[in-house]
Amino acid sequence: MNVPTPTGPVAMEAFEHQGQGPHSAIVVLSGSKGFGSPAYGEMAQAFNAAGLDVFLLHVLSREDVRVIAGTNGAAARKRYYAQRLPDWIGSARAAAAFLKTQPRHAGTIGLLGISLGANVAAASAADNVDVAALVLVDGGFPEGYSRQVRALPPLQLIWGSADRVFPLSLGRDLERMARGLGGKASLDVYEGAGHDFFLRPGTSQARAAHQSAADFLQRRLAQRP
């Protein structure tokens, strides 16, 4: 399906739980390589089994993925991210607002972002009443994010202890920040796991992390009034 956003329609793939009754919706935001990894399908299966509908939101266009892949050096990539992040964040917020209006989802929406997608998810969920739960995988707020954050939804952080892109210390800082705002936050650490462990299909750590995220989201969204 296509979701209306401030910058035009954005594609969204649906993996819906089969069964009667309303189902909470999870919007997933990919890393910088898009949704090419089969791990996204494995994750959707785990979420569906927990009674959740899953929506893969393509805030990164094909052109974004192409440009990012062809960019030389971290500094150049960061400049491109800074240029595009406002549109990506606007699209994620629009998708959450759209799904919240759908009777099937009973107004309960969660966000899950991975790496670059975690940057988008964190900024999209901050002070946003449309988002009732948030999972950030190996990533947090965008570098240089300057807006004051007053509230975050219940938060689960999933991190590889050997992540060299976003070190575990960042996850610990985010956990303290969320709790300092009066919110609920937990940090789920996978020993020896690198930055991309969540997207390694068929591995025990990826499966365990997918199940941990599914359990957290199902539990928190079920508590939403």
Image (tube, grey):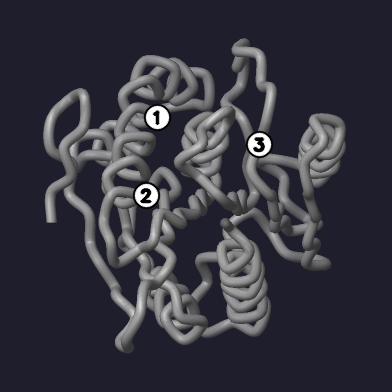
| Residue at 78% over, 67% down | 190
Instruction: Answer with left or right where residue 25 lies relative to residue 101.
Output: right
User: Amino acid under label 1?
Assistant: Ile
Q: Position of residue 100 (x, y in %)?
A: 35, 49
> Cα distance, mark 2 to mark 3?
27 Å
Disc 1: which residue: 89
Q: Residues within 10 Å of mark 3 (few under 14, many from 20)?
A: many
> Cα distance, mark 2 to mark 1?
17 Å
Disc 3: which residue: 152
Q: Nearer the viewer, residue 35 or 100?
A: 100
From the image, state whether disc 2 or disc 1 is nearer to you.
1
Q: Position of residue 2 (x, y in %)?
A: 13, 49
Q: Are dots 2 and 1 in contact, CB under 8 Å?
A: no
**Mark 2 or mark 1: whose residue is earlier in sequence:** 2
From the image, state whether disc 3 or disc 1 is nearer to you.
3
> Cα distance, mark 3 to mark 1?
15 Å
Quarter of the image where the C terminus is located? bottom right
Describe the element under mark 2 as helix, strand or loop: loop
User: Amino acid under label 2?
Assistant: Lys
| Residue at 50% over, 44% down | 131
Q: Residues within 10 Å of mark 2 (few under 14, many from 20)?
A: some
Disc 2: which residue: 33
Instruction: Answer with left or right where residue 197 lies relative to residue 111.
Output: right
Q: Residue furthest front?
A: 225
| Residue at 29% over, 49% down | 101
